[in-house]
Image: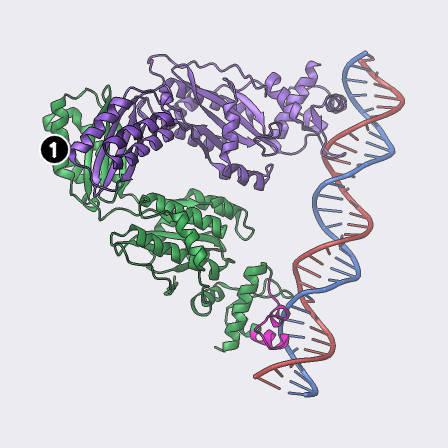
Chain colours: A purple, B green, C red, D blue
Amino acid sequence: MDGRKLKILAAVVDEYVRTGEPVGSKAISKLENINVSSATIRNDMAALEQMGYLEQPHTSAGRIPTFAGYRLYIDEIMTPSDLPDEEKSRLDEMLGGKDTPEELLVQNAAAALTEITQCAAVVTNAVPRFSVISKVEVIPTGKRLYVILLITSSGSIKNKACRLEFDLSHEQLEFFTKYVEENLSGVSVDELSDEMFDKMVAAVSAYMVSLSPLVRGICELSEDLRQQELTISGGEKLLSCEDLDKMEVVRFIEHKDELSELLEGTFSGIQVKFGSESDSFAIGNSSLIVSKYRKDGKEAGSLGVIGPMRVDYKKIIPYVDYLTQKISYLMSESEGDIISGTVDDYDSKP
Amino acid sequence: MDGRKLKILAAVVDEYVRTGEPVGSKAISKLENINVSSATIRNDMAALEQMGYLEQPHTSAGRIPTFAGYRLYIDEIMTPSDLPDEEKSRLDEMLGGKDTPEELLVQNAAAALTEITQCAAVVTNAVPRFSVISKVEVIPTGKRLYVILLITSSGSIKNKACRLEFDLSHEQLEFFTKYVEENLSGVSVDELSDEMFDKMVAAVSAYMVSLSPLVRGICELSEDLRQQELTISGGEKLLSCEDLDKMEVVRFIEHKDELSELLEGTFSGIQVKFGSESDSFAIGNSSLIVSKYRKDGKEAGSLGVIGPMRVDYKKIIPYVDYLTQKISYLMSESEGDIISGTVDDYDSKP
DNA sequence: GTTAGCACTCATCATCTCTGAGTGCTAACT
DNA sequence: AGTTAGCACTCAGAGATGATGAGTGCTAAC
């Protein structure tokens, strides 16, 4: 594959991303770093079309990249631009500092991506699977009404109100709290299971049957805790995007679980997926730029941008990359480790 | 104003709502309960146009209702249809029972309205302004990390993690908890003020200066508590609505505060407002059908539907009305009071 | 007061032509 | 052999033209 052909392919992608119109040979010949005539470019473009990297919407129009063309461009040709320092500090500000709760951190990242890219952002929270239950409290707050509070070592706090059939005496409450603390505190979130709670229900029911709703409540909270939640922010941006089918976008926003599944199956490092390449996540002509953030070295959640295929990869990839790294840093225990400024490793094979 | 003219106006609105096309005299003359010829209708329609209730998009087209036409139709002519019992029980199921937390209740109502009307729904939560602080807890959960828990008599639970500069001793924590409980429990949410917290900060700082972030934390939680939150659900439905300008819809979804302001200024009972009538909330050709729900007899929050002006008022109003009444009932302390099935009082003057 | 009849209006749709951007191919040039 | 100029060709898109028909207002008769 000719060096000039790559250059021309890159030029076609860049121009198409910029203008949204099919790109003709003449337009390319006028570009700065292209020094051959339009006829030569025509020949090369015909070759690129033969190879499957370009296509013509109709005979007398310019060329637009095919999937394969985008793929080649992203994987081999393009070099993402560097993020200037002021942008980095702007992002830092939007994210929040080390004290920011994890959940808010990823929400902030999503908001930042939406604003910067004007596309939809998608994030999953960090499932605190390696953290342990550090506290369970049951607090009476009204007639027959109790608030259950569940706190993990990673700082997740879940609560839930629970109505019982009878009021509990002070001793009963103390018994229950003690029992639960003994059985749950120090247990890792990953170890929590329905069977475990079933056993607990049986045990407390032996003491007092009407306590079981409280155990059920704790069980539900623990399910909340274990559940990976996916948030799409700025979904409406996709609706004002001409390249995407509105119906598909609406369907997509309403069925997050599909995307959730897809994200499960991704690797580390920045990846770019095209909607139509995967059958589970299907907005035609859409593109997903995604990366996984880590917590204490382990993959914890995902962070990405969904836009039209015609999106400025050179610009967006550094943002996703920087945010991923920054979040990984902020979530991890070890302090002092300054985030690396360099950006590499775009393993984007599907 | 002629009885027949009213009938014709109603027919025009109904037909226009049904078909979306301008309505001609011939189409109306074919309707069931119209027994005059198209020529007569033409005369009446010309009169209605003169009076400002109808207009023609262009000379050789049928008529469509003007704002005034809709207003007259809604206020004087139309009678909302009755909600069949099976629909009522369907709604009851979607809402949840008496044990459902208030916040979830209004969210469920929004979801139900979105699904049924295929328009956007808008709800505000019930600000628990007449409830009192029933519990404040500070729970140590990690090194220098504390969870503040704030519970009101109405069952709202707010929590927040707070990092201090030093760990607190058992005595210090006990002192603080006691101090806060003494000063806050029983205080109504409405009475909470920044000055109050400023005083508390001063007081605890005298004892131990590093306690003040905890007070600040409580202050923030109380702000959360007092804040009325507005949720728009199903905003995307508006985007697939031809009558509405997409740009305006996006702007609207992103600037909820405008709508929030508008809702503040509404009365009880079902009201219908048109986007272009008000200058603060402006999606052209949109219509807002809104009602306030009550808690223990006092207005607590709003509940409504936003759709194109060309919306089936006869059908939607009963839904909004029923949900409002049902929520009012579910939120109120007094039990047993069966919800009234009748629907009236559509004070919809702007 | 109501209706039939008729001339008139004008958006919409289909058809047609014109234009220009862009192509592929060939022949000349380096 | 690779590059370029030239040229005939294609075809989407923008206007122009004309037919169609739904709908109107007005007048005169019932």
Of the residues shown, which amino acid type is indicated by label 1?
Answer: Tyr
Relative to A184, is B92 above or below? below
* Mark 1, secondary structure of its residue: helix
D12 to A131, vertically: above or below: below
Question: Was residue B219 drawn as part of the magenta stretch in this picture?
Answer: no
Q: Front-most of B1 and C29? A: B1
Q: Quadrant of the C terminus of chain A?
A: top right
x and y percent of residue B326 in the render?
Answer: 35, 54
Residue name at image x 36 percent, y 28 percent:
A225
Residue sitting farthest toward the front:
A206
Q: In the rendered image, which quarter is residue A58 located in?
A: top right
Q: Which of A135 and A109 is in front in this view?
A: A135
Residue A287, position as x, y percentages in the image: 57, 29
Q: Can residue B219 be seen in this view?
A: no
Task: Say left or right for B257 vs B201.
Answer: right
First to last magenta residue range: B22-44
A296 left or right, relative to A258: left
At x 52% / y 22%, what residue is drawn? A265
Quarter of the rendering containing residue A312: top right
Q: Where B282 falls versus B222 (above or below)?
A: below
Q: Is residue B42 magenta?
A: yes
Question: Are there few (<14), some (14-19), or many (20+) residues within 10 Å of tag 1?
Answer: some
- Write the residue at 35% across / 22% down: A189
One can see residue A110 in this view:
yes
Residue B119 position, x and y percent, is 48, 50
Q: Position of residue B19 (x, y in %)?
A: 59, 59
Residue ID for mark 1: B179
**Chain label for disc 1:** B
Quarter placement of the N terminus of chain A: top right
* Count of all numbered marks drawn on residues in the image: 1
